[in-house]
Amino acid sequence: MSMFLSKRLLELSPYVPGEQPRDKKYIKLNTNESPFSPSPKVIEAVSDKEVADLRLYSDPDLKALCGAIANRYNVPAECVFCGNGSDEVLSFAFLAWGSDCGVAYPDISYGFYPVFAGLYGLNATSVPLEEDLSLDLTKFYNNGKMTVFANPNAPTGLCVTVEEIKKLALNNKDNIIIVDEAYVDFGCESALPLIFECENVLVVRTFSKSHQLAGARVGYAFGNPALINDLNRVKFSFNPYNVNRLSCVAAIAAVNDIDYHKACVDKIITTRNRLKTELRDLGFEVTNSYANFVFAAHKDINGREYYEKLRSNGILIRHFSVPRINNYVRITVGTDDEADTLLKATAKILNEVK
Ligand SMILES: *Cc1c(COP(=O)(O)O)cnc(C)c1O
């Protein structure tokens, strides 16, 4: 740190992403990426011509990309905003709507929410999850703050219903409700229809998890046109060309390849459900995850130790040194073969600690 750094940034703890190791080949189940390649149509779309066109700026209005998403999900194009990953969309949202009222989020949720709050100096409240790690949205009623949560939640994988979200929107009418649907394709009900009923609901999505495009950095949001205008106001004050040309054509091809997307999602759901069962058979407590990860704890081995032992077996998962979930680990659902390797290594580790 230099002596010139602003005080607010000095006090901030930046987000810590899962490792992207280069030292050796691991089975990588730590950052909720897809184990599958992008659609063949994506690979075709990123053509030599598109590469040659990199001399030109990308479209600041992202008309083709927003149009493709609007088309796919059957909403007007003016209800769609696109960003450089959903992290950027979220950060614009915090900046647009959190400054005056502050922000509230669950105590156990996506680790970036407190970071954005700190970065922008927002008054932030974290509201505890229930004892069973479920999310009770009535605790956010009329708190006078912008509310942000992930559905399914991360890293628990648990869902709330659209009915519960609607009640929250009606009981916090003067503030924005952000529903982060990074994992919604893996089995939760989407709050998308609410954008037409509730003018305070923004639904945020990403191409990183279910569309095999984490490295392309494309995220988007659905909301009524006034909210989308607010986000554009931030974007055009920050980075007008926020999504690059290659990522645009890649995301358009991905969103249009509905069959490939569905086939990949179905495989992940099948493997996830098998992992839940087989980890329970090994004595783990496993939450009822509707995401592309499972969240599990075992009474014979603490979360940190299990993480470290798997790591020395060449398997990377995620452990969070956070109160209440210290004993849990989050394991990304990979291929069936990767699940087999994980289960075998786990059985061996459990045998050693007994
Ligand atoms: C992965 C993730 C994101 C960020 O996704 P990007 O689009 O890759 O920036 C946002 N929210 C949650 C809950 C996530 O898990």
Image: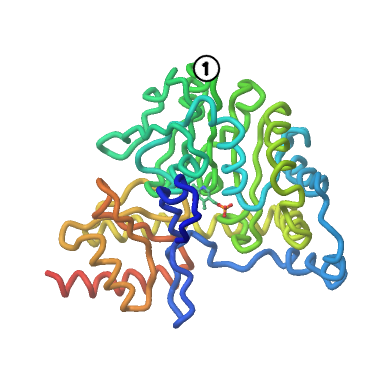
Q: Is residue 195 left or right of residue 27?
A: right
Q: Is residue 322 above or below residue 49?
A: above
Q: Amino acid at mark 1?
A: Leu
Residue projecting furthest to the bottom: 24
The residue where tag 1 is placed is 170
163 on left or right of 248? left
170 in relation to 123, above or below: above
131 versus 36 height, above or below = above
Which residue does the image show at 47% across and 49% down from the upper left? 9
* Mark 1 Cα-neighbour bin, 10 Å: few <14, some 14–19, many ≥20: some
Q: In x, y percent, where is residue 31?
A: 47, 61
Q: Residue at x 55, y 18 (%)?
A: 174
Which residue is located at x 39 percent, y 70 percent? 316
The residue at 66%/61% (across/down) is 216
Q: Pick whichever, 145 or 38, lies toward us.
A: 145
Q: Residue 57: where, in percent of width, then height?
A: 83, 57
